[in-house]
Image (tube, rainbow, N blue to C red):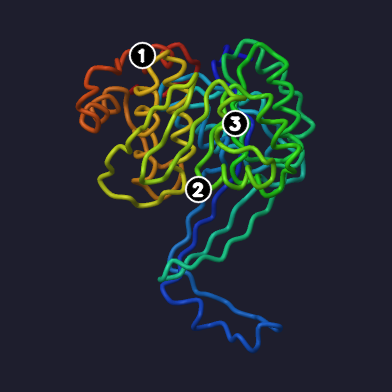
Amino acid sequence: MSHSPNVVISASIAFDHIMSFSGSFRDHILADKAHVLSVSFLLDSFKKQRGGVGGNIAYSLGLLGEPSALVGTVGEDFADYRAALTSLGVDTSGVIEVEGELTASAFMNADLHGNQIASFYPGAMSASREIDISPYIKDASWGIVSAGDPEAMIRHSREIAGSQCKLVFDPSQQIVILTGEQLAHGIELSDLVVGNDYEYGMMERKTGLGLGDIEQRADIMVVTFGDQGSEIRSAGERVMIPIAPATKVVDPTGGGDAYRAGLLKGLLMESDLEVVGRIAAQAATYAIEHHGTQEHSYTADEFVGRFDTSFPDFTGRVDPDALKAAFANMPGAAVGL
């Protein structure tokens, strides 16, 4: 590996295919003929964008000037995506190309009323379970395991927990796939558990572990509440974090992944939890102001200026140099941060 990243990420790497239809799906679906359904929609727009939980977290960490390494499997169509991440200083040596396969892809078609027809093709993602993450985490401070191939999630959680690296367990969309035993095991191994309030409810149903139980098992627990902010719990302390105001909420899809990047950045800066959470909140807001999960950008100075405006009581608590120092030493880093 060309450098020693502070964060190693094991999660999905995918392309998002975003389509829009200016009419209404219901006007073209006959309920009494659903057994022989055959419909076609003339699209008004189509975009292919970089995505996947792992790619999104790595992208925002790059903007925040934090070295990271992404681990996973992709297809033969990944070259441009790899170049984009590398330009931000992300180490992609652990992203393995599977011959004859395509990168995982999500296909989302939304109509005028916000109804959505979605499909997901896992492609090369399933092969990530064959990767030993140990070589990539030996010098890292944090390893985050988020939604991806279920077997890879369990394997990489164990490998990270068995090292000196701290584990962030973030099962998110895969809670429905993982068994209660697997979820409980991931929680027991983790140093930090993160999810939204609905996901914690799903975990409790499958594991019997409520918020209080998880709080006792993990050093840090983070609960997000969408536009109601978030809460960080650690060592009996509970810190409520407000959202960072958005100029306009365009697409909330990538907010959670950007939040996780900000959370890790704040922890690596050894900031107080109230500052850590606000860094995460500001990172999330940048993402939701754009269509697509990797369409936002900012410099270190811009981020700090926006942070001070969002949280005036915390003006001066984030030093822009802390967002630049790590980035400046990263090979292939983009100019401007």
| 117 to 89, vertically: above or below | below
Quadrant in the picture for the C terminus: top left
The disc placed on residue 333 is none
Residue 324, image x, y percentages: 36, 16
Report the mark closest to the observer, 2 or 1: 1
Residue contact at pointers 3 and 1, CB within 8 angstroms: no
Q: Residue drawn at (65%, 30%), measured in percent from left and top? A: 187
C-alpha distance separating marks 3 and 1? 32 Å
Residue 114, image x, y percentages: 44, 66
Q: Residue drawn at (57%, 33%), measured in percent from left and top? A: 82
Report the mark closest to the observer, 2 or 3: 3
Residue denoted by label 2: 49
| 193 to 125, vertically: above or below | above
Residue 120, image x, y percentages: 64, 55
Sooner in the amino-acid sequence: mark 2 or mark 1: 2
The amino acid type, in three-letter code, at marker 1 is Ala
The amino acid type, in three-letter code, at marker 2 is Gln
